[in-house]
Amino acid sequence: MVEPPNSGKPRDDIEAGPQPTADEQRPPFSPPEPALFSLTDLSFWYGEKQALADITIDLPLNKVTALIGPSGCGKSTLLRCLNRMNDLIPRTRVAGRVEYRGQEIYASDIDPVEVRRRIGMVFQKPNPFPKSIYENVAFGARVNGYRGNMDELVERSLRQAALLKEVSDDLKKSGLALSGGQQQRLCIARALAVQPDVILMDEPCSALDPIATLKIEDLIRELVEEFTIIIVTHNMQQAARVSDYTAFVLADERGAGRLIEYGPTQEVFTNPKEERTEGYITGRFG
Ligand SMILES: Nc1ncnc2c1ncn2[C@@H]1O[C@H](COP(=O)(O)OP(=O)(O)OP(=O)(O)O)[C@@H](O)[C@H]1O
Ligand SMILES: [Mg+2]
């Protein structure tokens, strides 16, 4: 009797073929610019709860990348994984790789304090210290033992944060006496004063009015000439206005955030590849 094809016997005439190379395992989109961060299968847990699952993404140098997605999908968690801010939260665990300039930032010989100096952060609610404008900006540099001319550093940082003109006549005034938008720019100046490479921004405009928001957006476009910016935003117009690339994150059925789509902002917003992305950006869910 002639055996029919596919009789279940193992075939020895075919091979699995070559294993995918590391490059082929990267996601379908990788920006043409050099990657500042390269994440591979990044997962994150708060205790038992998994908040991020298998995030693989390259974030380019000197560009603005926006992280978008519904509330609770893990955007802030992802941002905090980039500068080891999550280390400060007890009972958390990270798996996978986060390379920054080719160096694994979770390696045992890496100092998380130095990581956080190079990779600065600005939060949702402006949080100046109850100190003068000058001291707010000088604070981080002092802590890091800055030995240069402090007056110059404060002035330069305030100028870079587009705040100098509004405050130059009274740097002794309390940071808390500024408007919300000015306070947020003060926090940006404070982040810049430690001379970081990257600024992570977690919904930096959500507590601001439209005019203060536009000022921060203009500032982001100026800063990206010199820095790399990763911004979390719920505002789709803002993501479209300020970012070069957009990453869309969505929680899976277990609640762990996964990267659904990533690409040039223009493409993600006008011609998304995934229906779920389109649903989110057009406001059908989230
Ligand atoms: N400190 C924490 N301890 C325990 N669980 C946390 C903690 N922070 C966040 N989570 C959980 O992790 C998940 C992701 O939270 P995360 O704050 O990263 O979401 P998000 O996308 O930034 O949401 P939002 O848009 O509302 O800011 C959520 O389920 C949240 O409840
Ligand atoms: Mg958040």
Image (spheres, rainbow, N blue to C red):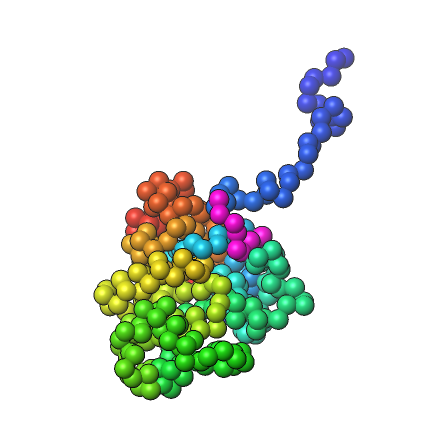
In the rendering, at what x and y percent does residue 65 appear? 42, 54
Direction from residue 284 to residue 53 in the image, left or right: right
The residue range painted magenta reads 32-41
Instruction: Please say whether residue 260 is visible from this viewpoint.
Output: yes
Direction from residue 275 to residue 86 in the image, left or right: right
In the rendering, at what x and y percent does residue 30 appear? 50, 45
In the rendering, at what x and y percent does residue 281 appear? 33, 50
The secondary structure that dominates the magenta segment is strand
In magenta segment, residue 64: no
* Count of marks placed on residues: 0
Where, by quadrant of the figure, is residue 162 drawn? bottom left
Residue in the picture at 23% in, 65% down? 211
Instruction: Please say whether residue 55 is visible from this viewpoint.
Output: no
Residue in the picture at 41% in, 50% down? 245
Where, by quadrant of the figure, is residue 20 drawn? top right
Residue in the picture at 31% in, 53% down? 241
User: In this view, which residue lies farthest toward the top?
Assistant: 1
